[in-house]
Amino acid sequence: MRAGDTVYAPPGEEHWHGATAGQVMCHVAMVVRDADAPDTTWLEPVSEEVYRAADEAVASA
């Protein structure tokens, strides 16, 4: 993702987002909610090991 990008995550799609060790991230979410739909399902936190591996992958890209 780059500054100004828009990302669409359809209902039910598992996804995560966050900063890297050298970059901050601002997350603004706009949600259209169906009153009959379930609430947000929060997934497990990302471990430091997984976070660092993702950060390294971004840095080498």
Image: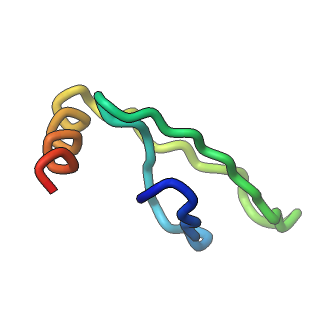
21, 15: nearer the viewer: 21
Q: Give the residue drawn at x 39%, y 33%.
A: 45
Q: Give the residue drawn at x 61%, y 70%.
A: 11
Residue 50 occupies which quadrant of the picture? top left
Residue 23 occupies which quadrant of the picture? top left
57, 41: nearer the viewer: 57
Outermost residue toward the right in this view:
35
Outermost residue toward the front in this view:
3
1 versus 54 height, above or below: below
38 versus 36 height, above or below: above
Residue 10 drawn at (x, y percent): 58, 73
51, 24: nearer the viewer: 24
The quadrant the N terminus occupies is bottom left
Q: Give the residue drawn at x 72%, y 58%.
A: 38
Q: How many callouts does the rendering have?
A: 0
Residue 55 drawn at (x, y percent): 22, 40
The quadrant the C terminus occupies is bottom left
- The answer to whether residue 43 is left or right of residue 41 is left
- The answer to whether residue 41 is left or right of residue 29 is left
- The answer to whether residue 17 is left or right of residue 20 is right
- The answer to whether residue 19 is left or right of residue 32 is left
13, 26: nearer the viewer: 26
